[in-house]
Image: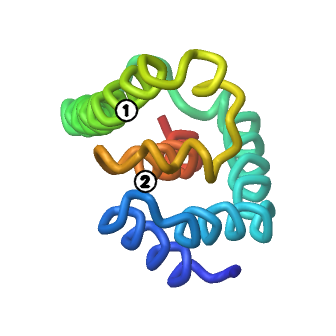
Amino acid sequence: MSSIRDLAASLAQLGASYQDLDAFAGVVGFCRSRWDIPVAFTAAYLVLVYATRNLIPQHRFTKIVDYGFAVWNLGLSLFSCWGVWHMSRTLLATAHTEGLYFTVCADTPSLMKHMGRGPCMQALALFCLSKIPELGD
């Protein structure tokens, strides 16, 4: 799987069926096959930072830019709260029933049997993918 459409379909399937191992494997397959995307974004980010570091005047942000940063950071905070809510409930319940060793060391198929309580794997996949646009932060 290497297209964005396939990735979106896998993420949508994870949102609908929380224990779908094939959908999670689709997300992992996309990340394995398209490792060039985060490398390209990171390289472009580093070039942009070093090329423009002396061109941008300090502390000359207008209110619209400050408002944009505030909205961006609020969105990141709400997204993180959503992910923590779903992951913590499931991981705490799984640690209670199976033990800490299982929650840390189990393979993905074994762990996903306990993920039927919410979109945990979707939250995990979206968190990993969200690191790319966060370079703009």
Task: Name the residue at 69% across, 54% down.
Answer: 41
Number of labelled discs?
Answer: 2
Q: Nearer the viewer, residue 77 or 25?
A: 25
Above or below for 79 versus 54: below
From the viewer's perspective, is the residue at label 1 or at label 2 nearer? Answer: 1
The type of residue carrying mark 2 is Gln
Specify the quadrant of the image occupied by residue 52. top right
Residue 62 appears in the rendering: no
| Residue on which disc 2 sits | 122
Task: Name the residue at 62% across, 53% down.
Answer: 109
Mark 2 crowd level (few <14, some 14–19, many ≥20, 10 Å Cα): many
**In the visual, does 83 lie left or right of 42?**
left
The numbered mark at residue 90 is 1
Above or below for 42 versus 5: above
Task: Name the residue at 36% across, 25% down.
Answer: 93
Look at the numbered disc 2 and give the secondary structure of its residue.
helix
Residue 93 appears in the rendering: yes
Q: Give the image location of residue 74, x and y in percent.
A: 24, 31
Task: Name the residue at 31% across, 36% down.
Answer: 86
Q: Residue furthest front?
A: 97
